Amino acid sequence: MLQDIINISKEAGELIRSRFNTKFALKFKTNESDLVTEVDNVSEKIIVDFIKKKYPTHGIITEEGGTSLSTSEYNWVIDPLDGTVNFAHGLPIFAVSIGVQKNSETIVGIVYDVMQNVVYHAEKNNGSYENGKRIRVNDNSNLRHALLVTGFPYDVRENPENALGKFVAFTKAARGIRRLGSAAIDFCYVAKGVFDGFWEVHLKPWDMCAGKLIVKEAGGLVTDFEGNKIDIFSKRILASNGKIHEAMIKVLKENP
Ligand code: IPD
Ligand code: CA
Ligand code: CA
């Protein structure tokens, strides 16, 4: 199954890459920042058609098409293009993200960084890999030396709380903050030790299913803002190298 997921992620990614910086239809979803392009939909179709053919009994949760749960113990959780705003503006930071859950536990996660042509993968209890090479979180324990990453939900204008105050606080507390625009890639960069920590509110299951496992299997920690265990439906996510987790929780608690 792992090789199948890698292959189909790459196939969808090749389609996305071939459409980068071309003309494509674009629609607003909830508002003018929340976009879907025809490329999101074609990528999703490639992946969903494959699952229906090869694993017809498995359930599927996708960003654009919704949920078709089944009686099978397996569910695929798919973001066919994570980083749509980047893609639409010609910024080459976006990914295909696929997680597979068995009885609600993620057992495989793949993030395909399309423009870097890099596959990140993790299997439960078997580590995390970048193009087949083992990756691990870094071991920095000092928040002042940390490079962090975050993102903002599409309703940040209506609900600035939980996003902007924390952003300001971390800007003062850490060495630097980045906002890449692809949550799936944010997780992978924590997993390989580029970023020390990543926090975000209102991520969706398809943004985090694969990435969460990739961080965990790379030796990192993924919790809510209080340090509690989370599932893919949780609204607040904190992923880190584990060593700066407590310091990040303190900042999250103290800053609304
Ligand atoms: C978005 C990206 C972004 C994050 C948003 C997500 P999309 O996914 O992951 O980094 O800040 O919350 O919705 O819409 O490009 O698939
Ligand atoms: Ca996404
Ligand atoms: Ca998406």
Image (cartoon, grey):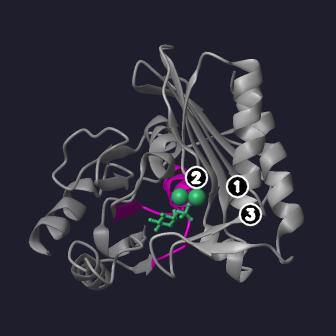
Question: Does the magenta segment cover residue 195?
Answer: yes
Return the residue at label 3.
38
For label 3, count other residues whose C-alpha is less than 10 Å away and answer few (under 14), some (14-19) or many (20+).
some
For label 1, count other residues whose C-alpha is less than 10 Å away and answer few (under 14), some (14-19) or many (20+).
some
In screen coordinates, is 50 left or right of 250? Answer: right
Which of the numbered marks, if any, corresponds to residue 41? 1
User: Closest to the observer: 78 or 32?
Assistant: 32
Is residue 91 shown above or below 19? below
Question: Which type of secondary structure does the marked residue at label 3 adopt?
Answer: helix
User: Closest to the observer: 181 or 16?
Assistant: 16
Give amino acid for label 2: Glu
Is residue 254 shown above or below 112? below
Q: Which residues are magenta?
A: 178-200
User: Can you give x and y, in whole percent of width and height, for residue 253 in the image?
Assistant: 12, 65
Find the distance from the CA under tag 2 to the CA under tag 1: 7 Å
User: Can you give x and y, in whole percent of width and height, for residue 240 in the image?
Assistant: 37, 54
Find the distance from the CA under tag 3 to the CA under tag 2: 11 Å
* Direction left: furthest residue: 254
Which of the numbered marks, if any, corresponds to residue 64? 2
